[in-house]
Image (cartoon, rainbow, N blue to C red):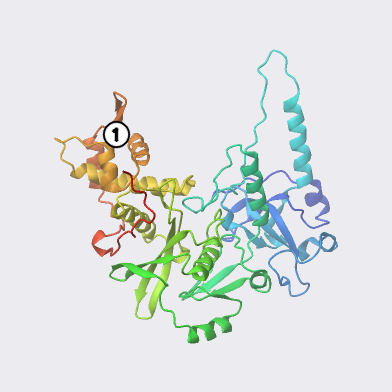
Amino acid sequence: MAETKAEPATEETAEVGLKKPLEIGDHCNVRWRDGEQVLMARVVERRPLLEGSRKRRKGSAATATAVDIETLKPEEVEYYVHYTEHDRRLDEWIKLDKFLLETLQRAEDMMKKRTSNEDENNKPRPSRRRSTSQTTNKSGDGASLSLTGGNWPVGHSGDPSLKQLEEEHEEATKVKNIASIVMGAWEVEAWYYSPYPEEYSQESTVLYVCEYCLKYMRKAKTLKKHKAECTWRRPPGTEIYREDKLSVFEVDGKENRVYCQNLCLLAKLFLDHKTLYYDVEPFLFYIITSVDDKGAHIVGYFSKEKVSAEEYNLACILTFPQYQSQGFGKFIISLSYELSKREMKQGSPEKPLSDLGKISYRSYWKHILLHLLGDHDTSKDLSVKEISVQTGIKTEDIISTLQSLDMIKVWKGQHVVYVKQDTINAYLKQKKKLRLCKPECLSWQPPPEKDKKVTK
């Protein structure tokens, strides 16, 4: 994380001292958790602390009215902050002593300055090209770890209705309602808001989840009792993949509605823009698990529509934080394409892709294409369509990847693969090993197509 330079001190903080609590919208440098780095933060929400013990009152959101907050001393208030140049998953509640108050920028002053600058920019300037006002969102709030944006458009492309929906989503989910989850042997810090019932996020910030049936509870003793009674040791549905201790289950959202709803609620804690929680019936869910003598422990999942007009082969994807950086992401992507090949189709992830999604998929596509071209007999022609059939990757994704490698040309209106052997050899020499799906371990065939129209 980059260290943020301090802004000039304000008269209130430097000379007089802070007289009232920080306001929502105030900006100030904050000392990060490691005690060394300094980050610029924006105050997003406030709530009171209990006097004496300094412990916060129950409830994940503010539990007092604005009038109550204003009657408190600044140090008697806890502040929810967003670090302006970082992902929302780092947002957190902090106390006043974390703020470097000499850098405080009041929201009211910032608004006046912004208005003044806009007025200045809007003044007519004779003999010059008419200026246009541009607003750039530097908050980083739109960042998402969901590879596909999780059924929520990434960016509104100027559409007012989508912009309004995005703003409403932003406001409704601005504060995490769960601090962490306990699941299996892990306690994992939550990254984002998830719409669990209010009673599960108001009295306790720790949520207890059964790693097998995904039932959620408020208390550790309730989970302990549940574990003694729960007979589940694996996800519902059908096991379709087994490779040593790695197992994948196909779960129908219609047949296992409660399980899939619980999965979506759980996943939302780690996906910023996922909006699908309850409408699970049109989807199939593929649950990736790590198997030991105790059972099949959920590692991650991906979902796909049963019927996709756009031929998407993946709607949402997640590897839970405790299993990240172990190669499961590429495994999940490769599995989605292996299913497409079994269906005799070419697939693509749901668009638009988030920034992280673009990086992950481009890395996978590059790996597959360069290995395929490296093994191909150069004396034989190879079309983009043939590559698409062999890999299950849609032609537009192949073209965009080869363009980034400068390995495709247009000749007589057709895209022609231009093999750069030096590029291929240099990549293959790196001997990158991705954790990919092994077709021989997949025991799955596509279901028969229903209501297929017969043409005469």
Work out which residue is located at the far front of the displayed protein and give it: 456
- Percent coordinates x, y for residue 39 in the rendering: 61, 51
- Secondary structure beneath disc 1? loop
Residue identified by numbered label 1? 407
Q: How many marks?
A: 1
Q: Quadrant of the C terminus?
A: top left
**Quadrant of the rendered structure where residue 77 is?**
bottom right
Q: Which residue sits at x=40%, y=59%?
A: 325
Q: Please state if 180 lies on the left or on the right of 59 as rendered.
A: left
Which of the two residues, 452 or 168, is positioned nearer the viewer here?
Answer: 452
Work out which residue is located at the far left of the displayed protein and give it: 379
Work out which residue is located at the far top of the displayed protein and give it: 127
Q: Taking the image as drawn, is residue 443 in sight? A: yes
39 to 236, vertically: above or below: above
Q: Please state if 402 lies on the left or on the right of 252 as rendered.
A: left
- Percent coordinates x, y for residue 145 in the rendering: 50, 54
- Percent coordinates x, y for residue 53 in the rendering: 74, 75
Q: Which residue sits at x=57%, y=38%?
A: 157
105 to 91, vertically: above or below: above
Q: Which residue sits at x=49%, y=66%?
A: 260
Amino acid type, label 1 = Met
149 to 282, vertically: above or below: above
User: Quick one: label 1, few (<14), some, or many (20+) residues within 10 Å?
Assistant: some
Which of the two residues, 133 or 393, is positioned nearer the viewer here?
Answer: 393
Q: Taking the image as drawn, is residue 427 in sight? A: no
- Percent coordinates x, y for residue 156 in the rendering: 59, 41
Which of the two residues, 299 or 441, is positioned nearer the viewer here?
Answer: 441
**Quadrant of the rendered structure where residue 222 is?**
bottom right
